[in-house]
Amino acid sequence: MFDNLTTKLTDLFTRMRGKGKLSEADVAEGMREIRLALLEADVHYKVVKSVVERIKARAIGEEVLGSLTPGQQIVKIVRDELSAIMGEERSPLNLDRSPSVLLMVGLQGSGKTTSSAKLAVRLQRDGRKPMLVAADVYRPAAKDQLEVLGREIDVPVFRLDDANPVEIATRAMDWAKSQLRDVVIIDTAGRLQIDEAMMQEVAEISQATNPSEVLLVADAMTGQEAVNIAEAFHEALGLTGVVLTKLDGDARGGAALSIRQLSETPIKFVGTGEKTSALEPFHPQRMAERILGMGDVLTLIEEAEQQLDQGKAEEFVKKIQKNRFTLQDFLDQLEEMQKLGPLSSIMDKLPGAAKLKNAATTEDESEMKRALAILRSMTLEERLNPSIIGGSRKKRIARGSGTKVRDVNRVLARFDEAKKALKLLGGRRNKGRLPLDALNLS
């Protein structure tokens, strides 16, 4: 999402680091470039004015001009100030009672229903017993959509077909208590734009359920308009947090950098994809570092620990040590990597990868998909014993996967390279986790 902003800021900081000493003129030019970069990223002009003034005040002091590493000091100041406007520290959910109610509000199309399911997945992973409430009685198939998602994630969905939203929410609370559900997530109706009827209905649901959290689901693609929406909902309902969706899209990032300061409402989660697992806690400092091209390795590690199967990893290491790596293992590991999301999302979190991302990830993503299609087109016997794959089998595999024989040969060659590399690791009796780059397809 922040690709253009990241590129502009990292280019600026590279030039600044190349100077042994910064003058006030250098700092003034740098501030101008930072201001333009933030405005182009659709950050609200009030936020841009405020943050640039604070950066400049610190940058023209002894902290920078008297430093032996002025370029690095500027980077630190910008990181601190970007983190500050986004809230400094992570704002966790308030789950202070049982059942705790999370009231999901927002305009139609912002992603409330999907975000409700994503929150349920995260809470379930944390040992909670969530339930979903279908309180959107207006949008066609809204209740059906929530039920489908509920079945997919194994979370119960409460719905009533002949009741108003307030009655649905009230009876859902009684059901939650009887079923010992400790978190109730209420998916409310939205409109195409803010109107009095919608606000009144949500206010009545809030009064009836006394929510622990009133969470605005806002679309990052709407840019500064997301800030206006947040301000309106906060004034009417007293928001406690924001879930910012579609951060994996082409949004320029202005909403993430503006909402907290202008609406006084913290961003609690960000949606980073369509999968029900694609919801990240929002860490302001980590996001600031990601914007500056420093990556977000901590989040990547947390995702790996949550998504990857530790049992499979340990079994895989044993196979490496015994030199029993097969095409089936190759397929298993590629499928494990996919759990971390698209390669572009992984590269976003790697330090210094911003300049490489656009050039590499599109080709690598298609290469990964071709490899998976080819491996899945093989029989189990072929994956366990690759030596039997001759010319006729390669043609059949290519037809089955919609690829060409040369693509099959490429995957087999990559497998041989990976097997040799893993044999070397096994020979050194590597006891730790296998690095994912050992299976590099590029």
Image (cartoon, grey):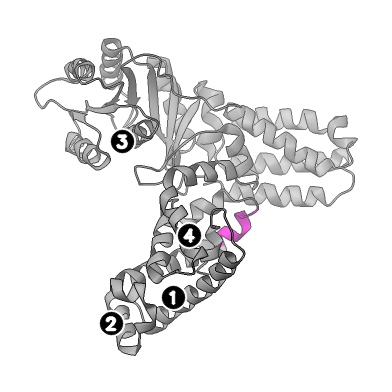
Which mark is first along the chain, 2 or 1? 2
Q: Residue 394 sits in which quadrant?
A: bottom left
Which residue is at a point 54% across and 40% down the rendered structure image?
42
Q: Which numbered marker is on residue 95?
A: none
Which mark is first along the chain, 3 or 1? 3
Which mark is first along the chain, 4 or 2? 4
Looking at the picture, does residue 138 appear above or below residue 275?
above
Which mark is first along the chain, 4 or 1? 4
How would you rate the neighbour count of disc 1 (Cα within 10 Å): few for under 14, some for 14-19, many for 20 or more?
many
Q: CA distance from mark 4 to mark 3?
A: 37 Å
Circle 4: element type: helix
Circle 2: element type: helix
Q: CA distance from mark 2 to mark 3?
A: 41 Å
Residue 308 appears in the picture as rendered: no
Looking at the picture, does residue 2 appear above or below residue 264?
below
Residue 247, x across and y down, in percent: 46, 43
Q: Which residue has dot 2 on it?
A: 396
Residue 301, x across and y down, in percent: 54, 44
Count of numbered marks: 4
| Residue type at tag 3 | Ala
Q: Which numbered marker is on residue 318?
A: 4
Which mark is first along the chain, 3 or 4? 3
Q: CA distance from mark 1 to mark 2?
A: 15 Å
Q: Which residue has dot 3 on it?
A: 117
Q: Nearer the viewer, mark 4 or mark 3?
A: 4
| Residue type at tag 1 | Val
Q: CA distance from mark 1 to mark 4?
A: 23 Å
